[in-house]
Image (cartoon, grey):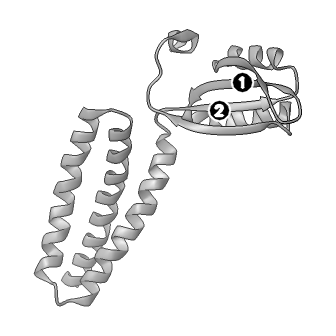
Amino acid sequence: MESILGYVAVFFARVADMTLATIRTLMVMRGRKLMAAVIGFAEVLIYVVALKFVLETLNDIPSLIFYALGFAAGNAAGLWAEERLALGYYVMQVITGRDAVAFAAGLRERGFGVTIFPCQGREACYDLLSVVFERRRLNELEDAVRDWDPKAFVTVTDTRTIRGGHFYRNK
């Protein structure tokens, strides 16, 4: 019974430390140094405890399997947690042949930062809307664009920092 509890503890320790590793990496990418350091501290403590158990039982195949399963599950859990946290900002570029001015005004009223650029495509002139928004609002914006112009060409990129502009002042 004690060894089964040890296996389960190793599994959940690996899930926890891998989840924290994913979130810590995100914090590093976002420039949140203090948060990354605090998470890294907790991550390493958990990792060392799990590793200690596995090293004491290196010839025990189930221990190694639970360690590896926890690593794999922790990666999936970390990605899930990162999606739910949705920290940071995206920039969506929307290229459309429709009149973008009214749509941009509506997006601005909903708190999105929008800039419109005229652009030239292969076949015609278009408008390019550059929309800055919080990651957690991605589905909302995708739905709005799809409802407004289902044929729009859309790209979404991650952005690390925003400064200035009306969007920033609204924060």
Q: Amino acid at mark 2?
A: Met
Q: Position of residue 102 (x, y in %)?
A: 82, 15
Alpha-carbon span between mark 1 and mark 2: 8 Å
* Residue pictured at 23% horizontal, 47% vertical: 40
Q: Nearer the viewer, residue 49 or 161?
A: 161
Q: Which residue is mark 2?
A: 92
Q: Secondary structure at mark 1?
A: strand
* Residue pictured at 37% horizontal, 39% vertical: 29
Q: What label does residue 145 carry, if any?
A: none
Q: Nearer the viewer, residue 1 or 47?
A: 47
Q: Position of residue 151 (x, y in %)?
A: 86, 39
Position of the N terminus by quadrant = bottom left
Q: Secondary structure at mark 2?
A: strand
Image-based side of 85 in relation to 51, left or right:
right
Q: Residues within 10 Å of mark 2 (few under 14, many from 20)?
A: many
Image-based side of 58 in relation to 75, left or right:
left
Q: Are marks 1 and 2 in contact (CB under 8 Å)?
A: yes
Q: Position of residue 106 (x, y in %)?
A: 76, 17
Q: Position of residue 93 (x, y in %)?
A: 68, 31
Name which quarter of the figure residue 55 lies in.
bottom left
* Residue pictured at 82% horizontal, 30% vertical: 96
Q: Residues within 10 Å of mark 1 (few under 14, many from 20)?
A: many
Q: Which residue is mark 1?
A: 129
* Residue pictured at 28% horizontal, 75% vertical: 67
Name which quarter of the figure residue 155 lies in.
top right
Q: Residue furthest toward the front?
A: 122
100 up-or-down from 23: above or below: above
Q: Amino acid at mark 1?
A: Leu
Name which quarter of the figure residue 2 lies in.
bottom left
Image label count = 2
N-terminal-most mark, 1 or 2: 2
